Image (cartoon, helix red, strand yellow):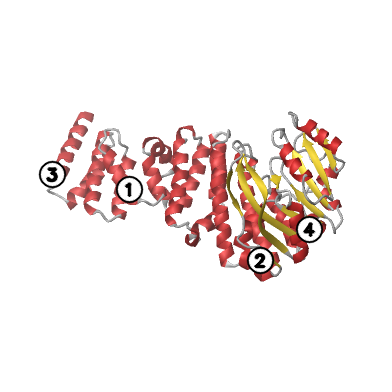
Amino acid sequence: MIYIRTFAYNAEKTLKRAVESVLNQTYRDFKYYILDNGSTDGTRNIIRNFAKCDKRIIPFYSSKNHDHTENLDFWNLPKNIPENSFFCVIDADDFYETSFFEEMLCFMEENQLEMAACGTEFFEEESGCAVGGRILAESLIIDQPEKWNLFFSKMYWNLRQVWGKLYSGKVAAARYDVEKPEWFPSYGGDTINVFQSAAVAKRFGIYAKKLHHYCLSAKSVSHKWMDERETADVILYEKAIEFLEQKCGIVSDQNRIFLYLVYWSALHDTINVLVCSQLSPEKQVTVMCNMICHDITKQMFASDMSAWGIGEKEKRCFQREIIHWLNKHAREYSEKSLDRAKEIYLQFNPNFSQFISKGQLLWYLRRMPQVVETLALCEYENALDFLEGVLAGEDVLPFAVQLAQSLAALLQRQEAYVLYEKLYIGVLIRQGDLQSAEAELAEWEQILPEDDTLVRLRRQLEEKKGRNR
């Protein structure tokens, strides 16, 4: 007996296709649990009509979406089926090939599997056209710890999704459904449940055939911001590490680097959803800071992912995109947001504070965001080149000239350093800080006593003093 579960929310356009793909299976011995998850469209009527026509369908109706306190028999289904039965999940917008059950059961029986996955084809929701998929070239049987370690990256995609699989009653019971631990993520819970099931499966297999079709939809939760989504990325990484430690006793360097790659991809996705969300700029900066400053993110950036096509160039490009976004919202920053932004800059360049103080940061973000970007990315030549183009203005502040001096010294550009010192003295004179100008000028007159620019600056200083008497 196979027990199938589908929960549907406002799925009147797709549910019929999903249900019919189950009812038309060549293997007929199943019970199909379908829940209307508080829909406001015609979903409930579709379920009711199917249940009237086929006694294998067991309908459930919830008053609110994602309320696990209703219809406990539906949510606790995996824990209540016999061990010699099987469990399956299909989303309300997906569908199976008619031979899915028959072929998967045969594959499991032949290889004595407790859990099995198949290949998936993706299709667009609007057009219905196929747009690729994930199918192994040959079937894979994992029955030893060494194989989990060896084939983990190859099979990882099949561990991410709950659908496209058959679970024995034993491994299905290991899932978290109603009773979830406190750490259970708000996003990515399907992956956690697959890990939980696979952890107790002694034999797991992937059938190298396309039997499942997955709908790519812009309405998917993966495109919507959920609270603590950034925490979910961390939890998924940590639980993948725990899973490998449990199955293999060790996490190989290759698999750890691979999981950094997975985390890298998740970070991109989460940031894209974050910046398109309706959260306030302050909240967005705080969430961004939490992600970038997390230890796992630091470890990822420090790791060598070049074997997977992620080198220093790609990391730098990613960092630049984040800085562009931060700088774009600079005018909306509160003092708290400014602190969070600076924490991010410091993650990319630990020496950032040596060049720009907290009190100066907002001025630079509003007047010279390119300088902030180049300094955060340790592109000192570019930072100095940009400063050279703007320091001639009448409203330049002394600390901007001092920054150019610091960069010239760092880059061992002696002539530029002297030039910026003279410019600095001139700015001090223009702004009326005559005491500081006198101290700087006197020191440099001893070093370059015949310098024409210093002579001119001395004349300007004395004239300014005379007017102030």
Identify the mark at residue 312; answer none if there is no mark: none
The CA distance from mark 4 to mark 2 is 17 Å
For label 2, the SS is helix
Residue 342 pos. (x, y %): 47, 45
User: For the residue carrying disc 2, how many other residues have a C-alpha within 10 Å: few (<14), some (14-19), or many (20+)?
Assistant: many
Q: Which amino acid does label 2 sit on?
A: Trp
Left/right placement of residue 167 relative to residue 319 reads: right
Q: What element carries label 1?
A: helix
Q: Distance between the residues labelled 4 and 3?
A: 85 Å
Asked if 314 appears above or below 441 in the picture, the reply is below
Mark 4 and mark 3 lie on one chain; the one further toward the N terminus is 4
Residue 372: quarter of image: top left
Which of the two discs, 1 and 2, sits closer to the camera? Answer: 2
**Residue, disc 3:** 452
Mark 1–mark 4 Cα distance, whole angstroms, equals 57 Å
Q: Do the residues labelled 4 and 3 touch (CB within 8 Å)?
A: no
**Residue 275 on image: x %, y %:** 53, 38
Question: N-terminal of the two: label 3 or label 2?
Answer: 2
Looking at marks 1 and 3 on the same chain, the residue that comes earlier in the sequence is marked by 1
Judging by the rendered image, the residue that carries numbered circle 2 is 148
Read off the residue under disc 1: 382
Tell me how far mark 1 sits from mark 3, CA to CA. Answer: 30 Å
Residue linked to disc 4 = 171
Q: Residue at x 19, y 31 (%)?
A: 466
Spatial CA span between label 3 and label 2: 75 Å
Residue 361 can be seen, yes or no: yes
Q: Which of marks 4 and 3 is in front?
A: 4
Are the residues at dot 1 and dot 2 in contact (C-beta closer than 8 Å)?
A: no
Are discs 4 and 2 less than 8 Å apart at CB? no
